[in-house]
Image (cartoon, rainbow, N blue to C red):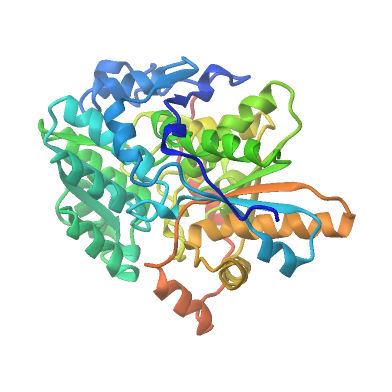
Amino acid sequence: MEKTKITLDENDIPRQWYNISADMPTPLRPPLNPKTLKPITPDELSAIFPMSIIEQEVSTQRWIDIPEEIINIYTLWRPSPLYRAHRLERALSTPSKIYYKYEGVSPAGSHKTNTSIAQAYYNKQAGIKRIATETGAGQWGSALALAGSFFGLDITVYMVKVSFNQKPYRRIQMESWGAKVIPSPSDTTNSGRAILQKDPDNNGSLGIAISEAIEVAATNKDTNYSLGSVLNHVLLHQTVIGLECKKQLELVNDYPDVVIGCCGGGSNLGGVSFPFLYDKINGKALRVIAVEPESCPTLTKGEFRYDFGDTAGLTPLLMLHTLGHDFIPPAIHAGGLRYHADAPQVCQLVQDGLIEARAYGQLSVFEAALLFAKTEGIIPAPESSHAIRCAIDEALISKEEGKAKTILFNLSGHGNLDMMAYASYLEGKIKDYEYPDGLIKESLSKLPVIS
């Protein structure tokens, strides 16, 4: 009988993170100081990040050791299981094999703890007392709240207002671990007040929440900023996912033809795919697919250029696929994918043809989520359901072609706290929304022009 659940021992937890910056065919363009348009220096970043994080952000070293204290906490949920989706395969009558890495087994219910623990550890080592951050759907905020409770740090979370209202149990989860949660935009920061003055009913965005959190960190000496996606060090920490996948697939003598991850900022996509992209860069036949919502189509419709990572323009300028830093996506239920840009590493790899990008509407994503729930038993997070939709489509294509392939996707979190989203879908209240090209062009027209 072929295995359903493929597990590793705690001794198999990776001892090093993989840094894809060491192997990217095209080096990343440097972050720029928005005032001077010159490459930003480590000293300029030290106002909001500890130096250990800054060193990881700019490193081109292939392997970076994981501190023992972080590994000790990882053992609470790592190694996470890899599942063979036998029941889903049968429902689809596909000749392909479908595997999913299940990150929902972490205490916070998603992959975000892989980096929240690391970031809290490095901030504690640097003597920081408080961390300010943003969260979209609440998964990142929950993960950092948990990490703060482990390391005795105060956590302030600016939660995108639409998600704050849609997902009260995420807020309660964060508060249960001791975090302070504020709906964004808020009246607690200059950037939040400015936005509310223009639009009192603003639903918020990750870009706005980032601006508020960075402002708090930059104006308080005992406070640093932390984020759950986009930057190099975050994707670095997530590579424990793909490194474990490789070991697990070796146990069943298999290797993926396709690796799939949903993509908002890029952390879970990078986590599952970067260790495999190392093989692809070195000649292995492999496809990697980033899946995003049609309502926030950063990789499929955004432009590859320098832009701010936040709405107020407080971050360095980064080279990435963007819809414009003041882009406000509609209030879709996959709140973790409502970001105007993507990780510079992911964007450059898309530019180089090493990662494909695909966008789906909400209705087909929830349809796939319910099929997965009924066959595999896990109700997935709406964000992760984008990857499920793509995996199902790839399996159906292989059925039409009569060619078996091995499909791997990252189930980055469970949907147990997303019941309002499922209720809306089951009641027929969710509609598809494809963001108009004209509004995207208008947003992009406001970007700085940098050669």
Q: Residue 103 appears at what percent x and percent y?
A: 46, 50
How far from the left and from the top, in percent, is residue 20? 53, 24
Q: What residue is at 41 percent from the left and 37 percent from the top?
A: 10
Name the image quarter holding the N terminus. bottom right
Residue 243 x %, y % = 53, 33
- Depth check, front residue: 8 or 54: 8
Q: Residue furthest front?
A: 1
Relative to the observer, which residue lies in front, 271 or 247? 247
For the point 32% across and 16% down, the residue is 41
Relative side of 143 to 246, left or right: left
The residue at the far bottom in this view is: 427
Is residue 208 visible in this depiction of the protein? yes
The answer to which quarter of the image holds residue 150 is: top left
| Residue at 64% in and 58% down | 85
Q: Position of residue 149 (x, y in %)?
A: 18, 46
Quarter holding residue 88: bottom right
In the displayed structure image, the side of residue 398 where residue 361 appears, left or right: left
Q: Is residue 112 above or below residue 365?
A: above
* Residue 307 seen by the camera: no
Vertical relation: 102 (above or below) 366: above
Tell me: residue 45, above or below residue 137: above
How many discs appear? 0
Locate residue 130 relative to residue 448 in the image: left or right. Answer: left
At a point 61% along the width and 55% down the height, the residue shown is 4
